[in-house]
Image (tube, rainbow, N blue to C red):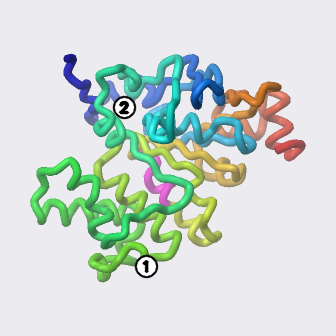
Amino acid sequence: MPSEEMIEVKNSATATKHMPAIAASDVSFYYGKKKVLEAVDMEILPNQVTAMIGPSGCGKSTFLKAINRIGELEGKVKVTGRIKFFGQDIYAKTVNLNRLRRQIGMVFQRPNPFPSSIYDNAAYGVRVFGGKRKAELDQIVEHSLRSAVLWDEVKDDLKKSALGLSGGQQQRLCIARALAVNPKVLLMDEPCSALDPISTMKIEELIHSLRGQLTIVIVTHNMQQASRVSDYTAFFNTDESRIGRVVEFATTGNLFSDPQQKETRDYVTGRFG
């Protein structure tokens, strides 16, 4: 029986500067026998924010779930091609999925705090991986809540239920929970779709504050949001068979101001979608 691969990336110049954080090569995704995503090629650079835009059903969220293999929890799936995380094949048979998902965290469309205290939510992932004393855990919880721009709002209520927080606070708590285990990549699937404009602004400010500290990939239907928060943008669409694909991938400024593909131009100018 082969041992499980570690999927662990340290803070080294080689890992952060000389290779993409995520490299997808000819990636197709199937739910059962149904192909929903085809031939995705993309290199996501470290410590940058990459947005994925496109109409509903074009494979954006599916590709996001393929990056940390959480799509496998939804049923029988198949992924062809290759996805590498700092040079490591994440679909190798020996990959440790817990370690992978620790390094590649995810925040979902709707906040999903656990029915426990604010403190226990923030500490959850760290406790799963174990080995932290109370004083060290306290520091990690405070740091993660500060990183999620939530500490000042909850520091006196850490023992209270997370379910009593507002929707926007719950979403930032979920981000804090993901950040507490020190991931290298944070995936965000429509993180503002269920939030009011003020909460959305706070999430966008949070993304700006995290820029340069880790790699962020955000799926959004809001093109204005993509243009505000991201360094790079990928436009997804479906072909005649309703299979998702990447039409264009470029710096955000170039994709919105000078798209090279007619499909992209039509979408960003509001002619369809």
Q: Inspect the image, locate mark 1, and give the three-letter code of the amino acid beneath it.
A: Gly
The x, y position of residue 129, in whole percent, is: 20, 47
**Label 1 belongs to which residue?**
164
Q: Is residue 123 visible?
A: yes
Reply above or below: 249 against 52: above
Q: Inspect the image, locate mark 2, and give the three-letter code of the amino acid beneath it.
A: Thr
Element on which disc 2 rests: helix
The x, y position of residue 210, in whole percent, is: 43, 52
Quarter of the C terminus within the rendering:
top right
Reply above or below: 254 against 87: below
Mark whose residue sits in front, 1 or 2: 1
Q: Residue at x 46, y 29 (%)?
A: 22
The x, y position of residue 247, in whole percent, is: 72, 27
Q: Main secondary structure of the magenta part?
A: helix
Q: Per the image, is 210 magenta?
A: yes
Residue span colored magenta = 206-212
Between residues 97 and 203, which one lies in front from this camera angle?
97
Between residues 56 and 12, which one lies in front from this camera angle?
56
Q: Per the image, is 177 magenta?
A: no
Number of marks present in the image shown: 2
The answer to whether the residue labelled 1 contacts the one labelled 2, judged by CB atoms less than 8 Å apart, is: no
CA separation, marks 1 and 2?
38 Å
Sequence-wise first label, 1 or 2: 2
- Which label belongs to residue 40? none
Q: Residue at x 64, y 49 (%)?
A: 220
Quarter of the N terminus within the rendering:
top left
Q: Does 155 sit left or right of 28 as displayed?
A: left
**Label 2 belongs to which residue?**
16
Q: Residue at x 52, y 24 (%)?
A: 79
Q: Residue at x 20, y 21 (%)?
A: 3
Element on which disc 1 rests: helix
